[in-house]
Amino acid sequence: MNEAVTNSDEACVERLSYLFSTLDHTELQGTKTIGLLEQLADGNIDAYTQIKELLLSDPNELNKLLLAAKQHDADNPESQIFQEISSVLIDIDPSFGEKIRQFEEKYSMSKSLETSYLLSLSGSKIQRE
């Protein structure tokens, strides 16, 4: 393992590799993240730093990863992949916390608008409290 990679980083590498193997990769097709995660899973430790830098600098890559995790959890209600990925990312770099919070706000708002729209189409008279 690279000398610059600490024991904490080693644990994050293992967790990321496991979570990547759990996710549906179709949600990540066309992203740089999937290639780096594949390299990491194949033992390329340098990919760890590249993943960190990519996800910190490119909000679209981070959002696609988080969206893939949310989709996995929606398809598998017993799963907590989104929470696990969020935890790993925050362990990698605490600044991910704010980025994840912003993603969750947008995701929740989007789901709320989608639900409101569907309710309006159904003619439902359900009112929000």
Image (cartoon, helix red, strand yellow):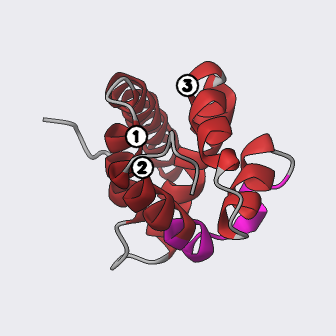
Return the residue nearer the eye: 37 or 62. 37
Which sits earlier in the primary sequence, circle 1 or circle 2?
A: 2
Q: Main secondary structure of the magenta part?
A: helix
Whole-number angstrom distance, CA of label 1 to CA of label 2: 7 Å
Q: Are marks 2 and 3 in contact (CB under 8 Å)?
A: no
Specify whether residue 121 is painted magenta.
Answer: no
Whole-number angstrom distance, CA of label 2 to CA of label 3: 16 Å
Q: Nearer the viewer, mark 1 or mark 2?
A: 2
Total marks drawn?
3
Q: Do the residues labelled 3 and 1 touch (CB within 8 Å)?
A: no
Secondary structure under the numbered disc 1 in the rendered image? helix
Return the residue nearer the eye: 123 or 87. 87
Return the residue nearer the eye: 36 or 31. 36
Q: Which residue is drawn at 48% across and 45% down?
A: 5
* 46 sits to left or right of 6: right
Which residue carries the number 3 mark? 56
Q: Residue at x 42, y 64 (%)?
A: 81
**Going by the picture, which residue comes out furthest to the right?**
30
Region in magenta = 18-29
Is residue 124 in sight in this rendering? no
Is residue 25 in sight in this rendering? yes
Which residue carries the number 1 mark? 92
